[in-house]
Amino acid sequence: MSVEVKAPMPGKILEVLVKVGDQVKEDDEVVMLEAMKMENPIYAPADGTVKEIKVKALDSVETEQVLMIIG
């Protein structure tokens, strides 16, 4: 079963902290998002393997935009 990691708010991707194929645990930081002049870590919602990354550093994202897929 795949889980989508979504942006909780609009902002800019500062850094993607994982790559495709990485194993992640629930609550691992996977993306750093800048919003309202603050750095906001985005956490993995579940254990799994990073299947797909849909953003890169400096991308602008909207609320609920899918950032990556963990399977």
Image: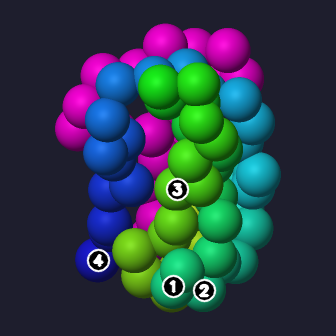
Mark earlier in primary sequence (1, 3): 1
Distance between mark 2 and mark 4 Cα atoms: 15 Å
Marks 1 and 2: CB-CB under 8 Å?
A: yes
Disc 2 element: loop
Determine if the magenta segment contains residue 28. no
| Residue that badge 3 annotates | 42
The circle drawn on residue 25 is: 2
User: How busy is the neighbourhood of tag 4: few (under 14 within 10 Å), some, or many (20 plus)?
Assistant: few
| Residue that badge 1 annotates | 26
Q: Which stretch did the figure color magenta? A: 51-71
The location of residue 22, given as percent across then percent down, is 74, 67
Residue kind at label 2, given as amino acid type? Lys
> Looking at the image, how many numbered discs can be counted on the residues?
4
Distance between mark 1 and mark 3 Cα atoms: 11 Å
Is 14 on the left or on the right of 4, as rendered?
right
The label nearer to you, 1 versus 3, is: 3
Mark earlier in primary sequence (3, 4): 4
